[in-house]
Image (cartoon, rainbow, N blue to C red):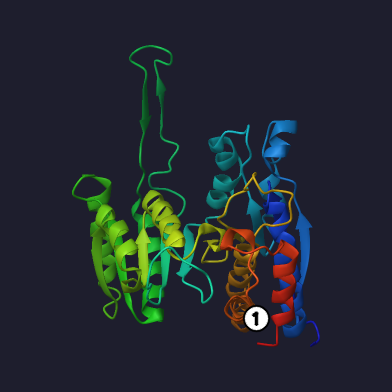
Amino acid sequence: MVGMTKRYRIALVPGDGIGREVLPPACAVLDAVGARHGIGFDYDPFDWSCERYAAEGAMMPADGLDRIRHHDAILLGAVGWPGTPDHVSLWGLLIPVRRRFRQYVNLRPIRILDGVPGPLANAPDVDFVVVRENVEGEYSEVGGRLNRGFPDEMAIQEAVFTRPGVERVLEYAFTLAGRRGKDLVSATKSNGIVHTMPFWDELVAERATRHPGVAWRQEHIDALVAKIVLDPGRFDVIVASNLFGDILSDLAAAVAGGIGIAPAANLNPERDFPSMFEPVHGSAPDIAGQGVANPLGAIWCASMMLDHLGHPEAAAEVYGSFTHVLATTPVRTRDLGGTASTKEFTDLVLDAIGHW
């Protein structure tokens, strides 16, 4: 244990279901590794959730974003619960956070971890990243419903692609590909979507000229999803619009063993605002409260948060600890075919910190 040199203020939003069960393990791991690296954490919990919506009519208070504006990072558990429409929980919490805090990069690492069974036979080494544009694109508020209740009822939803919005996520993706020393694939569908996707393609080609050392190509989204299933080892960095990135990252997580272990980072690369880290497994109402949720996704998020805050060695120690447990022990939670409780798996990870 070393003396404390840096403290961070973390906003905790456990949310719903197993979100409340996986954040405590992530915080325990953060505290353990922090003690070894001179890092301290102060956690401020917020009860923003579907339960709050049912009681008060809002996922979070009107000044909620102001309350967490000056935190160093946000850890989110899960959002969603039966009885609350998904668009209410999403647009009442996650999307406002992402947009107000300019978290325009959604970063999803995809790795097949040693000891985690995957659906692919003889899967190769898989280690790639999906960079998803996170605040505009297909998930816009432009549109509406007309003639509700009549035979000619209709709905209109407009996609919004801005040059600054696309360029900034492309710059992040090309820079990441250059740092990893491999290549970049851009997901498109410009043969069918005739305005936004050709615009996206043009901006990719423009941005590529600023990164001559990065090999790149574009793939149509329908062919790309097939290739990820058939040969996931061929990819390194994939950059995609909001909708395409959303679909690709969940598909890729399933290829790597399931969304129960998948982390995600909603990043403001300029660090003008706090970034948010969340496992993507959802609230899992069917197992909530049983103590059997897999904390791995949340613990991996803690590792990503440490890296974002400027502590790559501590981040690597967290990552190495849970991968060591998976590679050297048979202990697995129910979603990975085992019988271990959330606590049992977490305890092994804590024991491994500094000892693998």
Q: Tell me residue 277's x, y (percent).
A: 60, 61
Name the amino acid type tagged 1: Ala
Q: Image check: 340 left or right of 265?
A: right
Q: Residues within 10 Å of mark 1 (few under 14, many from 20)?
A: many
Q: Image check: 335 left or right of 63?
A: left
| Rendering quarter of residue 281 | bottom right
Residue 246 lies, with reference to residue 352, above or below; the image says above
In depth, the one of 52 and 141 nearer the eye is 52
Residue 340 lies, with reference to residue 316, above or below; the image says above
| Residue tagged 1 | 314
Q: Image check: 173 left or right of 117?
A: left
Q: Quadrant of the C terminus?
A: bottom right
In depth, the one of 226 and 102 nearer the eye is 226
In depth, the one of 98 and 49 nearer the eye is 49
Q: Quadrant of the N terminus?
A: bottom right
Residue at (54%, 46%) from the top-left corner?
95
Q: Tell me residue 89's x, y (percent).
A: 60, 40
